[in-house]
Image (spheres, grey):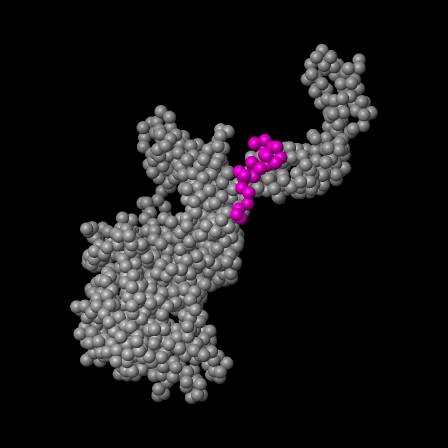
Amino acid sequence: MSELHKLTANQLKQEYKNGKTTPQGAMQALLERIEKIEPKVKAFAHLPERCLAKRCQAPLTQKIDRFEVPGTFLHGIPVAIKDNICVKDELTTCASKILEGFRPPYDATVIEKLRNAGAILFGKTNMDEFAFGSSCENSCYYPTRNPWDTARIPGGSSGGSAAAVAADEVTMALGSDTGGSIRQPASLCGVVGLKPTYGRVSRYGLIAFASSLDQIGPITKDVSDAALLMNVIAGHDERDTTSADVAVPDYIKSLTKNVKGLKIGIPKEYFIKGIDPEVKSAIEIAVKVLTDLGAICKEVSLPSTEYAVSVYYIIATAEASSNLARFDGVRYGYRHQGEASMIDMVANTRGDGFGAEAKRRIILGTFALSSGYYDAYYLKAQKVRTLIKRDFDEAFKKFDCIITPTSPTAAFKIGEKTSDPLSMYLSDIFTISANLAGIPAMSVPCGFTKDNLPIGMQILSKPFDEETIFRTAFTYEQNTQWHTRKPKL
Amino acid sequence: MKYYPIIGLEVHLELNTESKVFCGCSTQFGSAPNSQVCPVCLGLPGSLPVLNKTALTYALKVALALNCEIADFTKFDRKNYFYPDLPKSYQISQYDKPLSKAGWLDIETNGALKRIGITRVHQEEDTGKLLHKEGVAMSLVDFNRSGIPLLEIVSEPDMNSAEEAYEYLTRLKAILEYLDVSDCDMEKGSLRCDANISISTDPKKLGTKAEIKNMNSFKAVRSALEHEITRQTGMLSEGSRIIQETRLWDDNKGITLPMRSKEGAHDYRYFPEPDLVPFIFSSEDIKKVADSLPELPTSRRKRIIEQYSLSEYDASVLTQDKDMADYFEEAVKLYNKPKSVANWLLSDIAAATSSTVGIKQLNLSVGRLVEMLKMIDSGVISGKIAKDVLAGMIDTGKPAAAIVKEKGLEQISDDKVIENAADNVLRENPKAVEDYRSGKATALTFLVGQLMRHTKGKANPAIANKILIKKLGAS
Amino acid sequence: MMKFDKTIVEYTAKLARMKLSDKETRELALQLADILKYIEKLNQADTSGVEPTSHVLPIKNVFRQDKVKKSLNIADALKNAPEKEGDFFKVPRIIE
């Protein structure tokens, strides 16, 4: 069997350029790979066959020269799409029963951009329902498995995208991140995941979870691929008023191996009780690699860190409760049958169509906004959010970037945390603050536990400074071998 | 025990922008159902709103015309509730930082000006339309109207009678028409009104209020409020308590009925709309809009009184309707007798208009009217006959000269003909002649009337008068 | 300190127009009481004089021009409708 499925996007591009293979050849390899291992991984909600030939816009066997646009060119590169991103006429269900059968009549902006760059839309990946979760166990379909140990979770909510990339079922993938949903699964699956600055990538067509926190971002096999994908998806969109009118740099140019003099902050509040000693140790070693290469690492304080989870679970659930109110069985999705009155139809549709975690968040969010509680919960949380943002503003006056573990532990077992929602929420503790502050953050592989489970390092920088993250991550990656290891499947 | 009605009005106004408030769908009225929808106004998952700049400008114009303070920072909020015509299950509206507040509008009541406060003017979006099928337990939904820009104009509870409420609406509509931001058509639903009314023994203190809905014209608002005042006053004087509730006006029965609803008071869970960034206005922004405002009814009325020496009343009625006032000023440019023009406009011409046919829809251009007026001046027709000529012009769209010719309405100014007729009249009415000669001036009026009858109204009244007097004095 | 119990869950579920079974209501009451207790941490944060953050980026005054853009064709608009009649979405009656 060909090894094409193992290639990164950049490597695949090279193969195309050298005439060694065609997009059709690459797809064939991936489909064979999927056939072989998907039953063990279950990364996809909707498998890629349907995206091929008929719907795919990339001319499959044509010569590629005329599409050459340096740095943005994705011709013939298969990209898997998380199932909460609208792809015209394709099933887009957010892994929820309440959106069963939904085929949006429009493309998300990022999908339009991928099509214009010649990418092949390669299936819709599994996720926690409506992105509510950190384990991919809340999907209405099935839990995705971690390719490194299929008894464990891949992380969430973009667990399907991370697993598919890690298992070589696809070359690259898009995920979404509201509280860590790109970074945490990337960390747990040993791949690269970037949450861009809020407003860097258009949210038009991303089925909203928490509107002030959501971002779409790349999940890839290495840092260079992430830069490639970012070049395509980033940019201002007039259909999204929260998207920033800031020029997109060529992120490929930031892929330099140089961290001399780079000032890295290590927040003391992140190295707390409850962090796995192997994770702690891996981060410390990674930091040392960077200091040996010339970076200057110092401790920094982000004093409001302890409130982050609380702030998040009020603001995110409040916004989610409102965003999910449109699922009422009137215009799309599931409708509960046999009800005579509108009120009963809607109540039953929603009671039937949403999973347990979705209901939990809807109730919590509705409560936080309700009369009598708004000031104590929602308004208070918004004020503390300001404090969290200020912490980072202050820190970035003295530091170029901040490094933390992505997750306090490596992948836990399927079913381990499902009966304790609070402990599940606390596993987001390192990733949440970046969403609250709107800053960019990337997870890169930085080691393995003794059980051969991946560990991820998180790099954060100030708004619109993804370039520093790319530089730091690329330098680190190119001086280590983690990104070359593959799970045994 | 004196009871004071305390009334506040809430007006919702559809703005006549080309496209909807948060998306590019057309706002055209009367299109095929669900033919003017898109992911945004249909509330499809993943869609996002973007504010229509013209909707914002129109909103500012209205707020400024109503003398409001414009917020220097304004934002949108989500108003969350469930209803099948509300696609996102929240309405994008404005809650605690509306576009404008603390304005006013003067109405005339009992010959004096009364200032009605405007609490706020804010922006929001309209919902879709529900159609109920008869005999079936199903409803149909059309989302063409979903997302049309709305302004909510809330008055202070400063009105104390149904008539004042009527006046307020009339004045408000006049201003809105001058601004040309809406069709202001209650029948089409581009202007809607709900009323809040309570009765109190102290005009400064609010009583328990009832909210009245389903009034489809200004007259209905007045009637509904009159009914409510009677109903509530009756209850209070019997010692009954008024319940705070929503009541619907039944135009056929002429009463209000309580709206039965399973739901208690709504908890709308307002919070700032995260998908729309806030708006900050500079004083230059505001000034630019303020400078672009047309002359508004009150200013125009004052100017017309001064410029054309019209009465307060005449100027007031004329400026109530912008098109009428425009017509007046254009006509006076061609024919410098403002009082005459005004008279015709306010009587026969106004009578020919209706709620559906404005002066622009009448077959009566300014030029044509002026032609006719000149024909009166030159004696071709009498003033009285001119009324028939005008009616004919409006009916057929033909110019005055054609109507006069066709109907043979030319005034008789020939002395000989009138002398003849006068002789006949005097001979036929000896008693009147005697009455006149014994000092009754009214007898002359009678005789002139008879002469007009003889000549089918076409005799020149001034000449008829002169000749009769001469003949009466002769014998 | 407010007691987050079954009654509050029931009331909130009504606001959210979402039917919950008795079992779900009881479970949610326990789980959310737990979570809310954790969230009480927030009371320790000193937010006097702090403005709330609704938007994390300092963007303001974003509009679009008042130009008509092509709408969805009716078939696409109704494509996902669970029930329709002609060109309308069809829903059960609101029973007042």
Image: magenta residue range: B291-314
Q: Quadrant for residue A424, please give it.
A: bottom left
Q: Tell how many labels.
A: 0
The correct choice, above or below, for A465 with respect to B209 in the image is below
The correct choice, above or below, for C84 with respect to A89 in the image is above
Q: Nearer the viewer, residue A60 or B344?
A: B344
Q: Is residue B301 magenta?
A: yes
User: Residue A2 location in percent, x, y?
Assistant: 36, 87
Q: Quadrant for residue B355, please give it.
A: top right
Magenta: main secondary structure: helix
User: Residue A89 location in percent, x, y?
Assistant: 43, 68
Residue plotted at (27% across, 67% down): A431
Tell me if residue A461 can be seen. yes
Tell me if residue A309 can be seen. no
User: Residue A20 location in percent, x, y?
Assistant: 42, 88
Q: Quadrant of the C terminus of chain B?
A: top right
Outermost right residue: B416
Q: Is residue B390 magenta?
A: no
User: Residue A118 location in percent, x, y?
Assistant: 45, 77
Q: Quadrant for residue A108, please give it.
A: bottom left
The correct choice, above or below, for B183 with respect to A77 in the image is above
Outermost top residue: B438
The correct choice, above or below, for B189 with respect to A63 in the image is above
Q: Quadrant of the N terminus of chain B?
A: top left
Residue plotted at (62% across, 44% down): B361
Residue plotted at (34% across, 83% down): A6
Residue plotted at (73% across, 35% down): B375
